[in-house]
Each structure stands twice: as C-alpha cells, then as structure tokens.
Amino acid sequence: MMLILTPAITNRLRYITDLLIVDMLGVKVRLTISADEYTGYPGPKVIYAREPIAGGLFIESSGLLFEEKIVLQETKTSKYEDVPVLFNSVNPLTSLPFDIFAASFYLVSRYEEYLPHLRDRYGRFPYTESIAWKECFLDIPVIHKWAEMFGELLLKNFPGLILRFPEYKYIPTIDIDHAYCYRGRTLTRTMGGLGRDAMHGHFSDIILRIKVLSGLGKDPYDNYTYIRQVHENFMQTPLYFILFADDGQNDNNVTVTAESFHLLLRVLDRYQHVGIHPSLSSNKQYSRLEAEYTSLSQVLQRKVTISRQHFLRLTMPMTYQSLIQLGITDDYSMGYASYAGFRAGIAIPFYFFDLTSNQTTHLLIHPVSLMDVTLKDYLRLSPEESLETIRMMIDKIKSVHGEYISLWHNESLGNTGRWKGWRWVYEEMVKLAST
C-alpha cells in the first residue's frame, strides 16, 4: 500500500488517487494528514502539498484538488519526456515537474466543459474548445502516459513495489438510429419518402422501397445477422444502443410502436445487450428522456442500465445527472463526433465526478475514441485511410492497456448507398481489435 501525506483529504484528491494509482497502477493507496504516521510508515510514500514538509517523494500541489468551486484554472502546459503535461510545477524539489494529480483530474472530470465555452450547432462542446486540441495532444491518451511516468518514479524509489496495469479490452458497439430504411414506417412517412425520391429522381430507391415493403427484397439496414456473425468469429458480443424516438428531424427512428421493431429489440437483447440511445431533444427535456427510457424498458421487459447519447451530445453535468436519476450505470458517450481522439485523456472506464457537488458518482463512463461517421463525414477519409487511422488508434490503446470501444451504425454496415465498400473496414477492425 502507498501512503500519501497531504494537508487535507478532499473528495477530488481521493477520487483521482484512486483512479491514477489504484485503477491504473494496481497499487492500494491511503491518504493521511498525519506527519507522524507518514514518518513512521515503512512502505512507499509520497507527499502531495505546496511544500515538502518531510523527506521522500514530493509532488507539488497546484491547489486545484483542495478547492471546491469551479473557476478558471491556470494550467501551464509544457512537455516532459516528450509528453505534453499540464499544471507545471515551480518548486525545484518536486519529483515530477507538473502536478500529475491536478492535471489528470482536470481532464477526466471534464472541468473545462463546466466553464464558459462555445457550442456547435447541436449544442455540443466542440473539440476545438478543448485544451487537448489547443495543445496538440487530443490524439494521445496522456493520463496513461503520466501514470507510466509516476509508476517508473515509484519503482525507482521503491524497488519492491509491484505494479499491475489493466488488461486491454475491446468492446464493439452499434448505434441504431434507424432500425430499418423502409420497414416500420407509417403510411404517411412512407408516402413522403416516395415523394422525395421521385422529386429528386431516385427511381432505384423507389423500386427498392417497393420490393422491401412487398417482401421481395431485403431492407438495406437489416444487417443484424451479419453483425452477429462478424463478432462470433472473434467471440465478441456487441452492445446495441437504440434510439427509441420517432419525432422527426434528427430523432426519427422507425415508428416506436411497431411490433416488428419491438420483436427486433427483444431478439437483439437475447443474444447481445441493448441500451438506450437518448434522443437529441431529450437532452433538454428530462420528461422526454424518462418516457423513452420507460418505453424501451417495457419492450425489453427489464431495467435498462447502459446508454449512449444520440449525436454524442453531452452537457456537463446535466446529462449525466439525468442518467443517474434514471438508474443508468454505464454510459458510452465520452467522445467527439467530429474528431478521433481522447476527450478525457484516458482510455479506461472511470466514474463520473460531479464538480457541482464535488462527489464521485456510481455512473461508469466508457470513453469512445472514434466512430464511423467521424472517419467518413467529418475527417472525409477513404475506407483505406480510415482503416489506417483505426489501426493506429487500436495500437495506441493496446500500448497503454486501455479499452477500445468501436462505434458504428447498422446503416454503415449495409454496404449500400454512401456506405458501399465499408463493410471490409469493419471486418478488419474487429479482427485487429480482437487479436
């Protein structure tokens, strides 16, 4: 066990030492304010304070973890061992040239998202507002790098210490924004679709729609057997996140009362695991979120416990507070829709720390590093370029013993329309991530 001497034991400090030392290095940790206990302790020990009040390893505190309010921070960025670092130290006696605990907490708590910032057209925190983008380390899982630095420092000073890193893990996930392309729609929406296709001269789509609805053709988005087979080859089980809304505009899945839709969800839940994909509009309306959640739970005949926000729209801390109120235990929304990278600087699950209450919650956050739409629509990469980006991302996450979560849609696996030629990218990705 490691002992940390500190002038005060706060929820912020307890949270980040548990994450950085216990979860990432596999070492038990205890905080103390007693100098006598510290002096007499024979094992690994560290001082975390403004000044080194006793002998041993010393990490200079920036003060962030002893605060309770949310205020603009002076992060002071630089590089150490060719890795970007935040909250630079000025005390020459410090064992690391930056406050590793404050830096990690700042990123993983998403502190900057509580501060005033610009929003994109969907009301999201854009990656261009993040310190990681501005300081050019969004594509680096920096908290893992910092944990490795700290681990090396500990081993150098306490040779008998044993570090245990997390094991790499792959979790495939599929978002279902549109369960079917043509099936499960009301007559009004079907006629509207036919009218739009005719207006734009999409006569092949009209023919396909008629074939699907008459039972003579397969719906382009009905790829569920294929998805299961791809993952079974590598003994993987994907998670499905269901948009249970048909309100038009950005929240327009098939008719949610359709029995064919309910049957599909129950089948998917039998072989995989289904979660809620809260609609874009529900982010502002708790009553709508609750209605979607309740309806999906009723269809599945069980309590839903996992979620991912539609369009990856997160509003800190309200989105997570609402999920906690519903009873969600795990969320998979921590990523940027428009860029591949590490939004929280980390690639393992971590508990949501609510800065408004200064409390650790029971909501486990699973970071997402990239998705199909990011590659094709935002970064405008070809299938070949996308696979190379995916390969590099997987290698980065494997190298730090992280958790790689792939985010794709049933639509993009249809091998038709604008996604024609992308199936092989997914198959190669699953192979790379699983081996």
Image: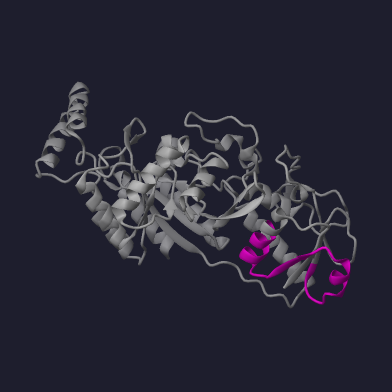
Can you tell which quarter of the image residue 256 is in?
top left
Left-right relation of 387 to 207: right
Left-right relation of 90 to 139: right
Can you tell which quarter of the image residue 253 is in?
top left
Left-right relation of 220 to 330: left
Q: Position of residue 221 (x, y in %)?
A: 25, 45
Q: Position of residue 205 (x, y in %)?
A: 18, 33
**Residue 300 painted magenta:** no
| Residue placed furthest toward the top | 199
Tell me: residue 309, above or below residue 16: above
Q: Position of residue 110 (x, y in %)?
A: 62, 45
The residue lying toward the viewer, choosing from 12 and 139, is: 12
Left-right relation of 100 to 200: right
Q: Position of residue 28 (x, y in %)?
A: 68, 70
Image quadrant containing the N terminus: bottom right
The reply to whether residue 8 is in sight is yes
Residue at point 41% right, 44% down? 290
Tell me: residue 316, above or below residue 268: above
Residue at point 59% right, 48% down? 344
How many marks the image carries: the answer is 0
The residue lying toward the viewer, choosing from 379 and 132, is: 132
- The range drawn in magenta is 16-45
